[in-house]
Image (spheres, helix red, strand yellow):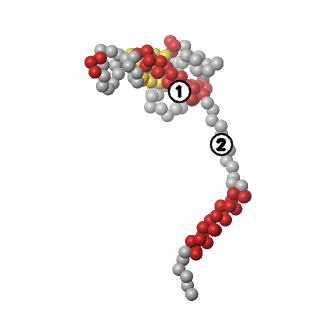
Amino acid sequence: MVISRSVVIPLYQIELNAIRAQGAGGQNVNKVSSAIHLRFDIHRSSLPDFYKEKLLALKDQRLTKEGVLIIKAQQFRTQELNRDDALFRLQQLIRSVSRVEKKRIATKPTRGSQKRRVDSKVKRGQTKNLRRRVDY
């Protein structure tokens, strides 16, 4: 499975098991194992350490304490489509970890924007002041 130009995961590192899908399905549901259980051991994989650290740091309920990522795919009626879906979701998860977020640089408001803000507050206060009861 190709993640990027330099990162490729061999399929033997991904464990795929066919299981019965949950939910309603009619007469066929108890006979056919169309859902896919994907297990990917992050520690034993050939991913670079950068990817491993980022994946293990995720706050994801699909990640076990042992560092195994479990994806259950049962959206489609056929095993092949569910297999492709599970592999695609794993690929997307690993790609999402590879993106490095830019560090935010804190900025101060400009002097002009501060002046406009204060002026609008003063104007609003004057408008409210005109609504008060008039004393003679």
User: Few, some or many C-alpha atoms within 10 Å of disc 1 (few <14, some 14-19, many ≥20)?
Assistant: few
Residue 29 picture location, percent across and down: 30, 19
Helix, strand or loop for disc 2: loop
Q: Nearer the viewer, residue 48 or 107?
A: 107
Name the image quarter holding residue 110: bottom right
**105 over 96 or under it: above or below:** below
| First-in-chain label (1 vs 2) | 1
Name the image quarter holding residue 81: top left
Q: Nearer the viewer, residue 132 or 108?
A: 132
Residue at the (62%, 21%) spot, across then down = 4
- Is residue 69 something that shows in the picture? yes
Q: Quadrant of the N terminus?
A: top right
Residue 107 picture location, percent across and down: 69, 49
Mark 1 touches mark 2? (CB < 8 Å): no
Q: How far apart are the two marked residues, 1 and 2, measured between alpha carbons?
A: 24 Å
Q: Residue furthest bottom?
A: 136
In the rendered structure, find residue 81 and report the number of the disc placed on it: none
Helix, strand or loop for disc 1: helix
- Is residue 39 something that shows in the picture? no
Q: Quadrant of the C terminus?
A: bottom right
Residue at the (54%, 32%) spot, across then down = 57
Q: Nearer the viewer, residue 43 or 54?
A: 54
Number of numbered callouts drawn: 2
Residue at the (49%, 20%) spot, across then down = 87
User: Which residue matches tag 1?
Assistant: 93
User: Few, some or many C-alpha atoms within 10 Å of disc 2 (few <14, some 14-19, many ≥20)?
Assistant: few
Residue at the (47%, 24%) spot, across then down = 69
In the rendered structure, find residue 104 and report the number of the disc placed on it: 2
Name the image quarter holding residue 37: top left
The amino acid pointed to by label 2 is Arg
